[in-house]
Image (tube, helix red, strand yellow):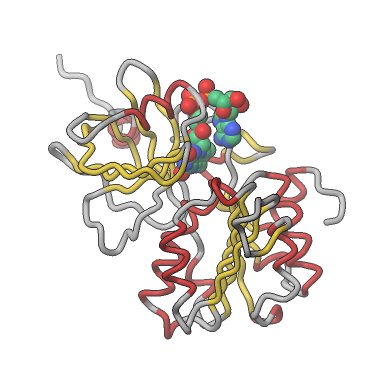
Amino acid sequence: MATVISEETATLRGAMTPLPYRVARKRRENHDNWTLELEPVDAAIDPIGPGQFTMLYAFGVGEVPISTSGDVETTGTTLVHTIRAVGAVTKALCASVPGDVVGVRGPFGNRWPIDAARGRDLVVVGGGVGLPPLRPAVYHALAHRADFGKLVVLYGGRTPDDLLFRKELERWRSRLDLAVEVSVDSAGSGWNGNVGVVTRLIPSAPFDPDDAVAFVVGPEIMMRFTARALIDRGVPADRIWISMERTMRCGVGLCGHCQLGPTLICRDGPVYRWDELAPLLGVPEL
Ligand SMILES: Cc1cc2nc3c(=O)[nH]c(=O)nc-3n(C[C@H](O)[C@H](O)[C@H](O)COP(=O)(O)OP(=O)(O)OC[C@H]3O[C@@H](n4cnc5c(N)ncnc54)[C@H](O)[C@@H]3O)c2cc1C
């Protein structure tokens, strides 16, 4: 007898089945980060949006959440992911070569609230490997430049060697309709740029705090201090958005690994409004 399953169960089953994607191109970004461009072998996942992530499966090793770092409006069914090799799965993904096949589930999570920034200044603050998840939002703002006020990208890394997308940052910097400031925590003699934590760039960055929306990604401590600095500058807490990272397994709100207070980051996040997120992190000043 045929088993009848509900539409919801069928959808979840679909969401739990990785689709094969072939590594089409691979680019080294720095000493421990690679960007993979993945093309569907057969069927493609639904279009991914800025801020969303997929579960990437290195067959026989494991599966990890990785954000889209590409220009989602122009890449079609090709997925662009920038991955830092930190452990078993990310090292296996970064060791893959063009022609290899990986599994993809998704897209999962919510998107950057780009509509909330439309008509206002958009301030994007990235720390370390926090820049890749922000890049699709920057691409969107550049492609629809007239929809936004000032566009500001602030980026911090530990050292110049840890910075991602350096050539692209230089290209962006040469534009007259975008302000880019980069800072490193420590640098040798070959670095003529800013030195210090990224939050130091906030007081003098060219945006109007009364009319700005901020998107922030980086290590949790950096995101806390960035939110604080933005608030000190006058940006309201409900116009600051943060993308959270936690260990994930299912990606669809079933396993509970990524629980944060009453929310599940895979289902309700990863993008949260700071005034709603801060109490969950136990940040006393809000
Ligand atoms: C929504 C979301 C989006 C993400 N997007 C990206 C992305 O675009 N690019 C990217 O490189 N990574 C991203 N990550 C982080 C990535 O999923 C983890 O680095 C990965 O799960 C590590 O798995 P692993 O098996 O390689 O390492 P593991 O063996 O699990 O861990 C190896 C080491 O890395 C540390 N580690 C594990 N997870 C993290 C983490 N999330 N942050 C910091 N340190 C960690 C561990 O403590 C351990 O020391 C994202 C995570 C989430 C939740």
Q: Is residue 134 above or below residue 15?
A: below
Residue at (46% x, 32% y) in the render:
85
**Where residue 129 sits: x, y (%)?**
53, 46
| 111 displayed left or right of 40 | right
Q: Is residue 244 visible?
A: yes
Q: In which quadrant is the C terminus drawn?
A: bottom right
Residue that appears at 61% across and 58% down: 191
Q: Is residue 25 left or right of residue 50?
A: left
Residue in the image at 28% along x and 33% along y: 14
Name which quarter of the figure residue 210 lies in.
bottom right
Most foreground residue, 268 or 285: 285
Answer with the quarter of the image where residue 242 lies.
bottom right
Residue 113 x/y as whole percent: 51, 64
* Left or right relative to 47: residue 280: right
Camera-nearest residue between 242 and 71: 71
Which residue occupies 63% across, 64% down? Answer: 193
Image side of residue 18 versus residue 164, left or right = left
The percent coordinates of residue 225 (x first, y second) are 76, 55
List x then y, in percent, for residue 194. 67, 64
Name the outermost residue toward the right. 284
Rendered position, 61 above or below 101: above
Say which quadrant the N terminus sits in: top left
On the question of residue 253 being in view, the answer is no
In-front residue for pair 25/150: 25
